[in-house]
Image (cartoon, rainbow, N blue to C red):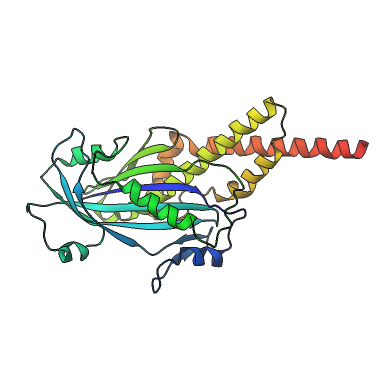
Amino acid sequence: MVIIGEIRTGLLRTSLPLPAQAVADLLSMRPGRQITATDRPINRTVSPDSIVGVDCTLSTDPQVKARGIGTVVTHAVVVGGAVVQASSRTRLEWVDYRERREWSHYTARRGVVDVLGRPDQAKVIGGTKLPAPQRKALDLGAVCQRMLNLVQGRPQLDHKIALRTRPTQLRWNATAREGARPRVHLHIDTDVRRTVDVVVPPELLTEAIRFCEDLALHDWLYTSLGHVVEQAERDMAAGADPTMLLGAALTLLVRLWMPGAHVHQALRPLWADLEVEPSFTASWQQNVAWIRDQVSMRTLVAWQEARLS
């Protein structure tokens, strides 16, 4: 069994982090459907699932004939009242029939796409890692972006940006193998795009969804804080004061760093692999310490200048 997915992560268009009730209102986009919220160790709120029907080709690498029919599940996630994610995924099932069945067959199986044409599993997974979907192929990124635009356009947001950041996209696949030890491989494709391969035993396949959302969140935090440091260094080189920029990063980003806090206990060891390469937390802590040192030194200098004036 294989699940494929994509997650897009960015900063909410709001000047201050939203309180928990405001986040609940933000994500209550479907009357009669309940959101899911966890307050500890930090607020994480998930919108009700949206279901999208698809009947299209599937990207494959190398390219072969493949058709997918079924449904894609999408939801939005807000963490700490500040970061928003759109997450789309579907489980792939290889089938023997060739002609499309009644839609009731597909709608009864939420988040499942039947794969026609019998392409090799490796070729379909390879297709998900291409820089862009092949022409008229399943595009989970487009489904994500539609959800992201919906959330970011909601009236609960004041649409004021406290910190300029770039969204990231993480494409992932999770493969179930009997008796497998959970393992993960992260590949940095570009500044904003990553691909992730996860292998888990069958009973943990659905838990891989939460792990990949957690990984996407922390990859975005790591990337955004690195860009803040780079921008601050450019500002200082140009004689500008980066204190406002650094303060916003400390306020919005630093408190959200909790790898594995919302992940199934059996998959938390995957973070240990990521701490070896690319050494997320060590680099994160180094950047946080640099930012705090800069803010402290500039605050001290400003205080001394005020005393002498």
User: Where on the picture, by quarter, is residue 120?
Assistant: top left
**Above or below for 294 versus 163:** above
Specify the farthest residue to the right: 309
**Residue sitting nearer the eye, 135 or 241:** 135
Percent from the top left, x then y, of residue 181? Answer: 29, 45
Residue at the location (55% across, 35% down)? 226
Evaluate whether residue 131 shows in this view: yes
Name the image quarter holding residue 58: top left
Residue 174 image offset from top left, x and y in percent: 28, 47
**Can residue 211 be seen at all in this image of the molecule?**
no
Quarter of the image where one finds residue 118: top left
Q: Is residue 68 left or right of residue 89?
A: left
Q: Which of these two is toward me, 304 or 133?
A: 133
In this picture, residue 305 sits left or right of residue 97: right
Q: Position of residue 301 (x, y in %)?
A: 81, 35
Tell me: 200 left or right of 219.
left
**Residue placed furthest toward the top:** 237
Q: Residue furthest bottom?
A: 32
Position of the C terminus, as image quadrant, is: top right
The residue depicted at 43 percent of the width and 44 percent of the height is 271
What residue is rendered at 55% in x and 53% in y?
Answer: 82
Question: Residue drawn 17% across and 66% down?
Answer: 104
Label total for image = 0
Q: Position of residue 28 (x, y in %)?
A: 45, 67
